[in-house]
Amino acid sequence: MIKNIVFDMGQVFVDFDPDFFIEHYITDPQDACLLRNELFCGSEWVEMDRGTMNEEDLVEPVCARLPERLHFAVKELLLHWQDYMKVLHNLDPLAAELKENGYSLYLLSNASVSIHNFTHKITALQYFNDTFFSADVKYIKPDQTIYRLFFEKFSLNPEECFFIDDRADNIEAGRKLGMEGFVYGGEAQPLREALRGAGVSLKL
């Protein structure tokens, strides 16, 4: 029986869009692509989510791989990227209904420690019991360790949890530990149907 609904954050409650962040500083398409690959797709960004690096730590190694004309953009993006992140409200009514129907709601997300300065903007979190971020525990999804730590912290039975994430590999990792889930593609109705199919009480 499902008692807990576990949500990812990126592309679920916030729009993490590096191209949108970059366009505030770079207009040349080739420079924008170069900056995206070296900053947001580089190994350092993963380590920031893992909590082993912070935004300041990324400046030197990323700039070392980029031409000098892009160094200012790197520094500005690392300082301000969260200012351009959009909050998504599509699932706010679902979160409210789940809470009203007696389910416990949790956030399980890969994010740097600086995310704690942003979460107050996510309106759906008013319905949540708690949040759990990768940087705080030094493990990232889909490593099964982060799921085990999450279950342990909140004393949750994986078989009583339903996980919603935009990445199939993250859902599969949770499923291997007994937590069913759904790959969210941005539309609320397919998610509602998946939840009802798992026995979650929701209106039609």
Image (tube, rainbow, N blue to C red):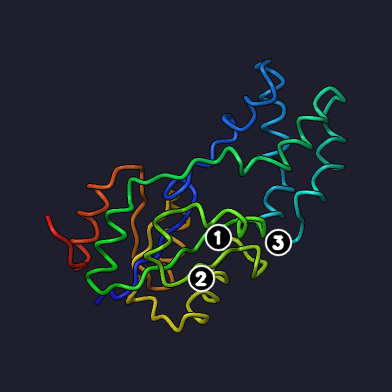
SS category of the residue bearing label 3: loop
Sequence order check: which comes first, mark 2 or mark 1?
Answer: 1
Which residue does the image show at 75% across and 35% down from the upper left?
A: 76
Label 3: few (<14), some (14–19) or many (≥20) C-alpha neighbours in 10 Å: many
* Quarter where residue 140 is shown: bottom right
**Number of on-image labels:** 3
Residue 15 locus on image (x, y percent):
48, 41
Which residue does the image show at 60% across and 56% down from the upper left?
A: 111
SS category of the residue bearing label 2: helix
Q: State the residue position of label 2.
A: 147
Query: Which residue type carries mark 2?
Result: Tyr
Alpha-carbon distance for marks 2 and 1? 8 Å
Residue 136 as seen in the image, left or right of residue 176: right
Q: State the residue position of label 1.
A: 141
Residue 41 locus on image (x, y percent):
66, 39
Mark nearest the camera among 1 and 3 is 3
Where 146 sits versus 91, above or below? below
Label 1: few (<14), some (14–19) or many (≥20) C-alpha neighbours in 10 Å: many
SS category of the residue bearing label 1: loop
CB under 8 Å between callouts 2 and 3?
A: no
201 or 171, nearer to the observer: 201
Sequence order check: which comes first, mark 2 or mark 3?
Answer: 3
68 or 75, nearer to the observer: 75
* Disc sitting over residue 51 in the figure: 3
Where 65 sits versus 109, above or below? above
Query: Which residue type carries mark 3?
Result: Gly
Sequence order check: which comes first, mark 1 or mark 3?
Answer: 3
* Disc sitting over residue 41 in the figure: none
Query: Where's the N terminus, which quadrant?
Result: bottom left
Query: Where's the C terminus, which quadrant?
Result: bottom left
CB under 8 Å between callouts 2 and 1?
A: yes
